[in-house]
Image (cartoon, rainbow, N blue to C red):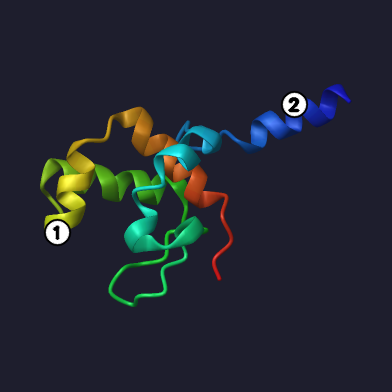
């Protein structure tokens, strides 16, 4: 039983250091464009489900820094802390792309 708890806890923490459970709560806003669990049905918005967590963090940091520009994403990223980015990345990395 102890090992199952350790495995469950480890499954929620990813390379970017995020917590998938915390990211799930924060991802509600993202789902408006990127779809449920990060599976966008609109080709204009990428699917985030299954993306590598470090990649997601890097892109969010670029939007926030202004080195990657998009009116919607840049505004959304400005409000995110480093912990928020890591948590969102961990959540989307655990989702299955459909």
Q: Position of residue 47 (x, y in %)?
A: 42, 65
Position of 59 with respect to 71 (left or right) is right
| Quadrant in which the C terminus is drawn | bottom right
Q: Position of residue 20 (x, y in %)?
A: 53, 38
Q: Position of residue 19 (x, y in %)?
A: 51, 32
Position of 47 with respect to 96 (left or right) is left
Question: Which label number is shown at residue 12?
Answer: none
Picture quadrant of residue 95: bottom right
Which label sits in the foreground, 2 or 1?
1
State the residue lying farthest toward the top: 2
- Residue pointed to by mark 2: 6
Q: Which residue: 41% across, 68% down?
A: 40
State the residue lying farthest toward the right: 1
Q: Which residue: 45% across, 46% down?
A: 53
Tell me the CA gap for discs 2 and 1. 39 Å
Give whichever of 14, 85 is nearer the camera: 85
Q: Position of residue 82 (x, y in %)?
A: 31, 30
User: Is any part of residue 78 visible from this angle?
Assistant: yes
Q: Which residue: 60% across, 35% down?
A: 12
Crowd rating for badge 2 (residues with CA inside 10 Å; few <14, some 14–19, many 20+) = few
Crowd rating for badge 1 (residues with CA inside 10 Å; few <14, some 14–19, many 20+) = few
SS class, disc 2: helix
**Mark closer to the chain start, 2 or 1:** 2
| Quadrant in which the N terminus is drawn | top right
Q: Are marks 2 and 1 in contact (CB under 8 Å)?
A: no
Picture quadrant of residue 96: bottom right
Q: Which residue: 43% across, 59% down?
A: 48
User: Is any part of residue 14 visible from this angle?
Assistant: no
- Residue pointed to by mark 1: 70
Note whether 90 is above or below 37 in the view shown: above
SS class, disc 1: loop
Position of 71 with respect to 8 (left or right) is left
């Amino acid at each position: 039983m102890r090992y199952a708890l350790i495995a469950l806890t480890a499954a929620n923490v990813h390379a970017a250091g995020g917590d998938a459970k915390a990211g799930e709560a924060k991802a509600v806003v993202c789902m408006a464009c990127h779809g449920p669990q990060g599976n966008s049905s609109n080709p204009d918005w990428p699917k985030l489900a299954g993306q590598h967590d470090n990649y997601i963090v890097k892109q969010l940091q670029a939007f926030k820094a202004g080195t990657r520009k998009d009116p919607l994403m840049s505004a959304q990223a400005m409000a995110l802390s480093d912990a928020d980015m890591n948590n969102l990345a961990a959540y989307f990395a655990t989702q299955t792309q459909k």
